[in-house]
Image (cartoon, rainbow, N blue to C red):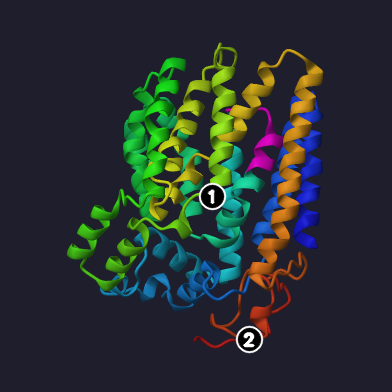
Amino acid sequence: MVLILTFLIALVFSIASENSVIAKKKEKYGVYSLFVLWLASAFRYYNIDGFDYNIYDGWYDNVPQLFEIKSDTLVRFSYETGYFYLMSFFKTLGVTFYGFCVITSAFFYCCIWKGFKQYTVHYGLLTMFFAYKLLFYDTHISMRQPITIAGFFLIMPYLENRKWVKYFIGAFLLSRFHNGAYLLFPLYFITYLNLNKFAFKWLYIIFTPTIILGFVGVDVLGPIGQFIQANADSEFTASKAAKYFDSDSTSSINIIYTLEFFLFSYFIYRRFDVIFEHGKNKEFILKLFVCLLPLFTLFRMSEIMTREKDYFTLSYAILLGYVIDSLNSKELRKSMIFFVFSFVNFNMTAKIPIFIETSRKSCFFPLHIELMRTSSVGGNACFRHFPPVLQFLGGGVSQQTG
């Protein structure tokens, strides 16, 4: 199974990165590991009814080129203007939807490296936690939100250093690609939180009991959704509000992931003084991690809020690196890394077949890459059986706009 093989290759590079004591080699193997996962994300095709890929493929087919946009064009498209113009720009260049996926996927992976390189030297841990937590949803299913998540990785230094003008400009631009980025505006004020061990403990004491609200059926965000539905200017907006603001057990955070979060939080608390004894970036990463607390408790049943967790999930890997560095014994550090990689490997090899089975169809052909179509964008049935961006020599394929 190609996806499992790809993950195992990335795992090998991640292990090599963690075992290397030379900084340049650690970086090199870390880049290799992310590059292999990028191949799996970019050159894939999952043909599933209801999955975002097919929806966005249809949108791309129908979006006009830049010089064809009219004053009423945006009214006919129900997504954010930034994403609309991004698709229109690449379509104007002659890039296929498959090529568009490759380019945006490359942007996502480059932002992971650029954004987190300054916060950790544990590139292998970062890659494996990314694969475990974000690989499937954010690079195989979701299309718009990964762009805003990637952009957030780039503007994190502005947030950390309280450069509010640059940060808010960046957050505004990202909100033009996905509305979930509006969360980044109030996020700025978390930088003023003095997050010592005492505050860390009390935040958990306050929020942990609220997890009960979801289980007893209290709809925390329901009134907001009802207000939006009552005042919506379109049926689309009203239906989105009904879907995202109503608490729903089918979109809640998995209880296993919740227990995992609290177990990791307890481990951080137990070694708090040792971990945060020194290091200018550590408190900032901890603040990002703590942002997950209300999402796993008070808002865990709300789809619109649980989607926001992916902005902060990679803080797991960074903090875990801090934990490992705080251990005195070299053997204990190696044992910890071995345990983490074994845990991730076990979960990934179990999850990948399930994901593929759910997808019903997947293929990965890193040869015959076609980024440009020589004819109009459309939907030849045979052509669509090939994965995104794969048909370098496929210029003769005729396609009709659907």
Residue toward you, 262 or 109:
262
Q: Residue at x 39, y 45 (%)?
A: 299
Magenta stretch, main secondary structure class:
helix
Given the image, on which type of amino acid does mark 2 rest?
Answer: Ala
Q: Position of residue 287 (x, y in %)?
A: 45, 28
Label 1 sits on a secondary structure element that is loop
Q: Circle 1 is placed at which residue position? A: 254
The answer to whether one can see residue 323 in this image is: yes
User: Residue placed farthest to the front in the image?
Assistant: 216
The answer to whether one can see residue 144 in this image is: no
Disc on the earlier residue, 1 or 2: 1
Left or right for 120, reference 81: right
Q: Residue at x 54, y 82 (%)?
A: 376
| Label disc, if present, on residue 381 of the rendered structure | 2
Label 2 sits on a secondary structure element that is loop
Residue toward you, 302 or 74:
302
Left or right for 192, reference 16: left
Q: Quadrant of residue 375?
A: bottom right
User: Residue placed farthest to the left in the image?
Assistant: 231
| Label disc, if present, on residue 192 of the rendered structure | none
**Mark 1 and mark 2 residues within 8 Å of each other at the beta carbon:** no
Badge 2 density bin: few <14, some 14–19, many ≥20, Cα 10 Å:
few
Q: Position of residue 202 (x, y in %)?
A: 40, 22
Q: Position of residue 19 (x, y in %)?
A: 81, 29
Q: Magenta residues?
A: 119-129
Q: Residue at x 50, y 26 (%)?
A: 286
Q: Quadrant of the N terminus?
A: bottom right
Q: Residue at x 18, y 64 (%)?
A: 230
